[in-house]
Amino acid sequence: KDYVIWGDKSDFEIAETESQKINISQSLSLKTYTIKELEKAKVELTADEALSKAKKQAAFIAGSQVPATAEIVAKETEILADGTDGYAKVKVTIEVRENIGIFQSFTGIF
């Protein structure tokens, strides 16, 4: 059974919730919740600023998916929307080379 010791549910429009469970004994545990209210922010950018930000974000996201053991062979950035229509859209392609084979010795008769 759960008992609320302090606080109540939040009615924030946008919130981030973190929870933590601490086992005090076999039959007793303590749950803590931290609720942070988030606010919407609107930032207006010029077409060039929006395109630059889109390129940086796309390159970061694509680069974070490349394994550390892979060798980057080529990068390509394609502009799909330049920001003049109110939005910027960029496609980043990264070509990598990675040794994914595992050597296994085999001794047997064919």
Image (spheres, rainbow, N blue to C red):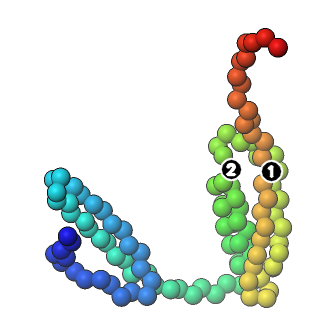
Q: Is residue 90 above or below residue 106?
A: below
Name the residue beneath numbered marker 2.
Answer: 66
Label 2 Cα neighbours within 10 Å, binned few <14 / some 14-19 / many ≥20: some
Would you place residue 100 above or below residue 51 in this image?
A: above
Location of residue 2 in the rendering, given as x and y in whole percent from the top left corner = 21, 71
**Who's the residue at 78% across and 54% down the image?**
94
Residue type at tag 2: Val
Residue 95 got which mark? 1
The answer for how far apart the CA atoms under marks 1 and 2 are is: 9 Å
- Name the residue nearer the viewer: 91 or 29: 29
Give the quadrant of the C terminus: top right
Residue at screen point 24% across, 58% down: 22
Which quarter of the figure has residue 44?
bottom right
Q: Are marks 1 and 2 in contact (CB under 8 Å)?
A: no
The answer to which image quadrant residue 56 occupies is: bottom right
Sequence-first tag of 1 and 2: 2
Q: Is residue 33 visible?
A: yes
Q: Regarding mark 2 in the picture, which secondary structure is present there? A: loop
